[in-house]
Structures are given as C-alpha cells and as structure tokens.
Image (cartoon, rainbow, N blue to C red):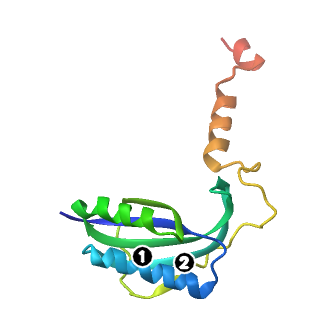
Amino acid sequence: MVRDYELMYIVRPELDDDALRATVKTVRGLLEAQGGQVIKTTLWGKRRLAYEVQRLRDGHYVLIVLRLDGAKVAPVERALRLQDAVFRHLLVLHEGPMPEADGEIEESSLEAPPADSEPGGDVTTASAQTEEDEAEEDVPTASDEGDE
C-alpha cells in the first residue's frame, strides 16, 4: 500500500554545495528506483547537532516528503545506511495534508540558530510555562483558608 512519508537525513558537513546537491540527487534517485515519488525536497542548511555523532558536530539537514510503498521502506533504509555522505536519517509517516508537488529543491527560509549557542539552553516553552501557572493556582493561600 502506498503511503505518505517524510524523510529527514543529515549529510556530512565537509561537503561543499555541489557535493551536497549531488548527494541530494543521489538520494532522490535511490527513492525513485524503489518506486517512490518525491513530492518536495527542502534543504534546511548546515546546523549544529544536539550531540556529537561519529565525531561530527554539524551537518546539512535535508527534508523530503514522498509517497512510497510500505514494503519498500526496509530497502530504502538499508540503502541510506550504505550512503557514505548520509550519516543519520529518519523515515516516518507524514501526517496532515501533502505539500504541493514542485519537483525542485527548495532552500529553507528557516533561520539557523547562532553557532555559539548551546543546544538545550534556558528556553521556557509555552507548555512548560502553562504547567507552572497551573501549579501555582492549586496552592491554597491564607485568604482561601479564612473563607471556609
């Protein structure tokens, strides 16, 4: 059964733009050889990894939205493991509406975090802030005890 997937993979940081584009075309060819239909390819650019992987601290992130037969997932993942330029990948089911098919490689407009920032810094998310607010509301105060 053909399903919609997202493939995120990270390419070695030492590759220049030409080698990166060649790797992206190679992966695309690999997907199409397995009967996949590439809907959209987005280059996220070079970013810092959360932790060191194979002695690498940076990598070029690429996101591909595709249609693929579920029986072909294992051969695709095996072929990705054999790619020298790709050192990490994740293939998951795509949820939500599919983007429009453009067939071209798109440069992402997402801004990369500053290179000197540490991953996992003191960023409070909205959900964490909401949980803190709810916890404060449950604590009884002196005025609450007097009202009883």
Front residue of 29/143: it is: 29
Kindly identify which residue carries mark 2: 43
Query: How many labels sit on residues?
Result: 2
Q: Position of residue 11 (x, y in %)?
A: 56, 70
- Above or below residue 48? Residue 119 is above
- The answer for how far apart the CA atoms under marks 1 and 2 are is 13 Å
- Above or below residue 15? Residue 78 is above
Kindly identify which residue carries mark 1: 27
Front residue of 126/15: it is: 15
Q: Position of residue 80 (x, y in %)?
A: 42, 66
Q: Residue furthest right?
A: 116
Q: Splitting the image into 4 quarters, where does residue 31 fall?
A: bottom left
Q: Splitting the image into 4 quarters, where does residue 109 fall?
A: bottom right
Per the image, label 1 sits on a secondary structure element best described as: helix
Res. 112 in view:
yes
What residue is drawn where x is 43% and y is 73%?
64
Q: Which quadrant would the N terminus be assigned to in this image?
A: bottom left
Q: Residue furthest left?
A: 1
Rate crowding at label 2 as few (under 14), some (14 to 19) or many (20 or more) other CA atoms within 10 Å.
many
Front residue of 128/78: it is: 78
Mark 1 vs mark 2: which is more N-terminal?
Answer: 1
Per the image, label 2 sits on a secondary structure element best described as: strand
Q: Position of residue 72 (x, y in %)?
A: 25, 64
Q: Amino acid at mark 2?
A: Leu
Q: Position of residue 83 (x, y in %)?
A: 46, 69
Q: Amino acid at mark 1?
A: Val
